[in-house]
Amino acid sequence: MSDAHTDEPATPTGPAASHPHVPQHTVAIPADVQMVTLLGPRDELLRTMERQFPQVEIHVRGNEFHIGGPSAEVALVERLLDELLDVIDGGQPLNRDAVERSIQMLRAQTVERPADVLTMNIVSSRGRTIRPKTLNQKRYVDAIDENTIVFGIGPAGTGKTYLAMAKAVAALQAKQVNRIILTRPAVEAGSGWGSCPARSTTRSTPTYGRSTTPCTTWSTPSRSPSSWPPAPSRSPPWPT
């Protein structure tokens, strides 16, 4: 959290000049926070804030933010700084995507705080932590925690399988479950195996590989995969 929010009478310049009677707000950043973690390399994150708040004039002097402009926009900038400081306190590095998503959530006035979304850890392995990156991804993860069965429906590449596998591995590591069972249609809807003479394991690799890859990446097995017993497989019926 920021140390102080004060108002100073000042005459803004630039975009804030159209509001000459609006006082300038000063937000002091705690001394134990390195400003580069908040401003980004070469002030990249500061430039992102300026682009997202074109009506607000933002100046940084030492560990203080001097903000001038419409009161509603200035209040949003102050809330944004508080959220970003909480993210930093949680050990999560900031980037431009995180700043932009935080601003979107603040403008949408969501129930969830940006800091809660960006600092939610699912599973960690080999120095890498898997966490939701968007509000809907956090809601999806929360739904997995609160319900026995969850159906994830959405466009490809939105993290449905990836986050579900991360939650499964986290439950396995916490001994909440004894094993993970992967199941999905052997033949995608509207398609068929064709007359490929390959073995069933060869034909199913592209289908199951997307799910098994993150599982083997995050989990730490007690035995090498080569010593695992072979999984039973059944060849699907050939299309007629």
Image (cartoon, helix red, strand yellow):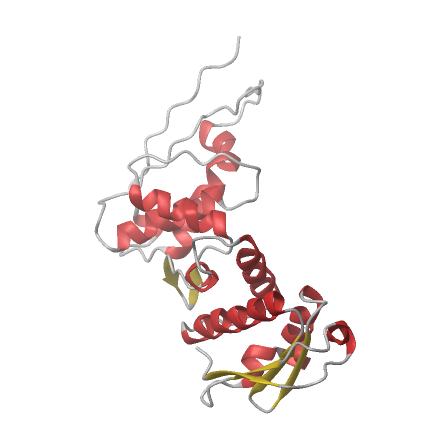
On the image, the x and y values in percent for residue 227 come to: 30, 49
Where is residue 64, by image quadrant?
Answer: bottom right
Q: Residue at x 30, y 55 (%)?
A: 221
On the image, the x and y values in percent for residue 228 come to: 30, 46
**From this viewpoint, which residue is outermost toward the front?**
21
Of residues 134 and 198, the one nearer the viewer is 134
Of residues 16 and 181, the one nearer the viewer is 16
On the image, the x and y values in percent for residue 87 come to: 46, 70
Quick check: can you spot residue 226? no
Give the vertical position of 169 relative to 196 (above or below).
below
Number of on-image labels: 0
Give the vertical position of 123 relative to 186 (above or below).
below
Location of the N terminus by quadrant is: bottom left
On the image, the x and y values in percent for residue 54 come to: 72, 67
Give the vertical position of 38 relative to 107 (above or below).
below
Q: Residue at x 72, y 73 (%)?
A: 19
Q: Residue at x 60, y 79 (%)?
A: 39
Where is residue 7, by image quadrant?
Answer: bottom right
In the displayed structure image, the side of residue 238 where residue 143 appears, left or right:
left
Quick check: can you spot residue 80? yes
Of residues 79 and 37, the one nearer the viewer is 79
